[in-house]
Amino acid sequence: MIIGAFSNAALAVAVPYYAGVALNAVINGNQTEVIVNATISLIFSQFVRGCLQLMRNLCAETFSQRIERDVRDELYASLLGKSMAFHDMQPVGEIMARVTNDVREMNLMMNPGMNLIIGSGFFLIVPLFTAPTIYPSLVIFPAIFLVLYFFAQYRFIRTLNPIAQQVRSTFGDMNAHLAETLDGLQVVKGAAREELEIQRFNELVGKVRGFFIKQGYIEARYISFLLLSMLTLLGLIHAIYLYKLGLIDEGKIVTFLGVLFLYQFPVYSSLRSLSQVALGYAGAGRILSIIKAQTDLDQNSTGRTSKIAGRITFEHVSFGYNENNQSLHDISFTVEPGQTVAIVGQTGSGKSTITKLINRSYDVDSGRVLVDGIDVREWNLASLRSQISIIEQDIFLFSRSVADNIRFGKQAATRDEVVEVAKKAQAHEFIESFSEGYETVVGQRGVTLSGGQRQRIAIARAFLTDPPILILDDSTSAIDSATEDRIQQAIWAASKGRTTILITARLSQIRWADHIVVLRKGRVVAQGKHEELLASSDSYRRIFARYEEAQPQSDTVQG
Amino acid sequence: MFNSLNQDSYDRLYSDSYLFKRIGSYFSQQKRTLWTIAALLVFFSLLGSIFPVLIASSIDYLNTDDNRPLLLLLGGLFIASIIDYLLNWWRGRMITRLIGEGIAQMRSDAFASAVNRDLGFYDDNKSGKIVSRITSDTQEFGNILVIFTDIFVQLVQLILLGAVLISRSIELSVVVLLWLPIFIGMSLVFRHLSRIVGRQGSRAMAAVNDNIQESVSGISIAKNFRREGLIYEEFVAVNSLSYNINLKRGYVLALIFPVLNILSGFGTASIIYFGGMAAIAGSINVGSWYLFIQSVDRFWFPIINLASFWGQLQQGLSAAERIFALIDSTNMVNQIADVPTNELRGKIEFKDLVFEYKPNNPVLDHFSLSIRPGESIAFVGHTGAGKSTIAKLIARFYEFQSGELLIDDKDIRTLNVQSFRSKLGIVSQSPFLFSGTIADNIRYSKLDATDEEVEAVARSIGDGEWLETLPDGLQTDVGERGARLSMGQRQLVSLLRVLLQRPPIFILDEATASIDPFTETQIQEALDKILAQSTSILIAHRLSTVRSADRIIVLSQGKIIEQGSHQSLMSAGGHYAELYNTYFRHQSLSYIENSRQMLAEGS
């Protein structure tokens, strides 16, 4: 690339040089063969120059496209490695803007940005060497110009950089709002708030526009244009002066002017390329800030990797999602291998948070979470997670076939295995009812499946991995009662032979559990068996008061 | 994988002339700016072509004894330089503003259009790809204008210079013109090449965008199952595809400048040769010859540039095409009139209605039902029985295929959708919160609600005890999509939204399902208040909640198989009684003991 850039600049000088030679040939008596030679040399040199330039451009193009691809790959890999704490705080749309547009800006920064800067850099130097060969003192104005030019460019970048950063970050905000609104469109429409969302979006668009225009204003003021035309003028005057003194001839004036014209390329191109570099630099900063962001959790790849028996112990665990707000206070309980534990409590009491500590979606602030008597932080993260299956509240299915979604945790599973777990999860029937059966592609965020269907696919997905620890986070709650009855049995079957944690509001599941932990505002207020708790705990009785009321009625109907 | 680069269903082809006209309309609102820019550009081009003439003339005057013309020319050059710089500054500002406004306008239009599409549109089209159209494609579109102005300047210069050159020497002008066909030919070759590689670029970008949106949204699943590797591989595949396409596109663009340089080198050489010969022969003077040498580049540059711009122009045009396709995409839901809804009593009537998401797969089959104002109706039935669909049709989210749906005896298709929906209170299956505070989210349905009203509604449930578990109470930031709240809290908030709104028609879709029994009791009280004053459509799986409805309708495969009050249905001993018993049976102790035993025996 650099060779290409250098030879490009060097060979570009050939044009004014041969033009000057030819001009002199004409003026100093009609030397036809000199003109012919100059013409042939010119053709040859420009041909070589073009070929070299082509090679350089192809290299630069490959290089910059590779940068785009590799940076995006690396950024993506880094995103996958981030803890959930990171992802909970980052809007998806913002991340998208970084992975797509900021990375693209980096590509453009390399090519044409850096490519032009390096390429044109030689054009800046070449006149310094060629001008003195025409006449020594002719180097003065190019030299002065260069000093002023570098100073001007430096100032230009300094003013441009902060604006470029603003352009990129407002763009990210705009993207975030956009992605969020489109995902929540049903709510927007349901509340007839389209106008409001459009107005909010327009505000963000307005901000992006503001900085874009500001950037444009700075670019318009580009002082190097003026420097260049002043240089041309002063150079011409200088050359004419030398001519009048008889120190140089007309051909040399022409050659010198041609040499000065070489500056046009760097000056004109660096307006674009410097802006491009500023944007790319801002983009690179945003990308790096993600890659460098603390993951909170280390993978602990040298940690323990054995098979989990399933004993879970919480020892005085406290935890908060942010520093000034504790979600869990001093939680202690133990689950024996194979036991089923139900965690009950009001919404916001910290039930889901407890499960997130077991598979290290988050790490505790104080106390310890032990699996098989070993602190989860001492387990190899990959080994730990692969043996814990979580069925979350908010079920996410990927836009691929139902079979592939079920197979997600175990790619090697055969079709028979997939069908078997689907049957166990009571999902087989409805999957078969689709026209394409197991090959039906799930729409984005599962839109074409009902909540109940999504949950059953998620349960099948968890069954397939046959984990020693199964965590069910409220997951049967949106399934209608008849289906629930069947699912219930499937879960009971699945919970057999493994440690199961149920986060639930369902009396049936609570009664089934071997142990019940009652949470209130992040503290354990009672634990034990259903009967014991009914007898001993006020909070527990309060929760079940309504169920107990409803009970006799159904019994009478049954009876 | 390659499917992802196919067109989206709503893509369409526009003719170039239509595209230009439409793009023009985006800038026609700024006519004065546009004219100013045009005038500036002409001036600017004039100045641009004056420079070589002035310089060449000064060489002509080198040998005259009188220095005044030379000084005059140099003075002219100085003034021209200053004016040139100032004009360029002004032009830069104007153009930047024009582009900035144009892009912003287009983004607003595209977003407004995306927001106004039916929900059905999003069932078929991925939102990640739509995001890409609204942000990336509009950016690409902005380039068009830069290109236009550049081309304009260069064309004007071309004409002016051409005139000057011809006036100086016809023979040399002929030499210059002889090169024209070659340059134009090259332009056409480039145009052809960039067409081939151009269009796929945006699609590749959209595919990358979509892949990222989905995998980032589903990242917790990937982590739980340790499948980061799998989705990484998929991403790498999409990304590599995008790389290959962009590389091809880049190669075509990379060809342009070297070819330009070679050609212009040849051109200059020919001018040096023929001009030199002519000068020797004495048919032109040295200054004119020099003018030719100096200006051939300027003369050919616009033409070859058109070729290089062509790639970008194509890209910009196909970006514009993609944006217009989004703006022009049609809704399935179409209103035949625009009657505003002022007062709504809340009467809802389905008459022989047929609805299907996919052809020949009816979800509701000749469905008829009349709901009185103020009545509360509970729909029960298995998953897929069509309960949610009924709610979505009432909300006018989807278009039905035949039959009628009347609201207050008026055809729902004649209503102004906006004003109608603002009279509905909907709590949907998966609660969705927007980033902002809890108070913001509650206020979403009624923007003019005072802080006191919001506070009062929030505290109307369980004395606001649920707020105490939140770090900043009502001012707690919920995070994107409400991610920082538990599911139960999200449901509470989306319910409070409707409680604040007090709508004439209330639709509750399975929303209380994962709220704990204690909170649910409190919600029930609040719900009872709404039920008393609104026509209510309840789709809940908790039969205990459903019992409080005036009428219960049992659905199966899009048909009503039973209806009546709780008592009457229970005594009828039909489907409802069975559902009811199933539901509570498995909450009884004896049932659980039985199951345990069955399992023990089974193994």
Image: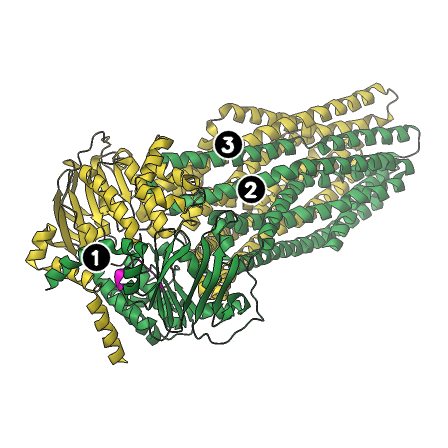
The residue located at (55%, 30%) in the rendering is B97
Label 2 resides on the chain identified as: A
In the rendered image, which residue does mark 3 sit on?
A: B101
Q: Earlier in the sequence, mark 1 or mark 2?
A: 2
The image quarter in which residue B73 lies: top right
**Badge number at residue A548:** 1
Please identify, in this view, whether the residue under mark 1 or under mark 2 is nearer the observer: 1
x and y, in percent, of residue B185 in the image: 58, 47
Task: Specify start and end residues of the magenta stretch as a single range.
Answer: A502-508
Marks 2/3: CA–CA distance = 19 Å
In the rendered image, which residue does mark 2 sit on?
A: A169
Label 3 resides on the chain identified as: B
Helix, strand, or loop for circle 3?
helix
Please identify, in this view, whether the residue under mark 3 or under mark 1 is nearer the observer: 1
Q: Are the residues under marks 3 and 1 on the same chain? A: no
The residue located at (79%, 41%) in the rendering is A16
Helix, strand, or loop for circle 2?
helix
Label 1 resides on the chain identified as: A
In this rendering, would A150 be left or right of B108?
A: right
Chain represented in green: A
Q: Amino acid at mark 2?
A: Ser
Q: Residues within 10 Å of mark 3 (few under 14, many from 20)?
A: many
Chain represented in yellow: B
x and y, in percent, of residue A480 in the image: 23, 58
Q: Are the residues under marks 2 and 3 on the same chain? A: no
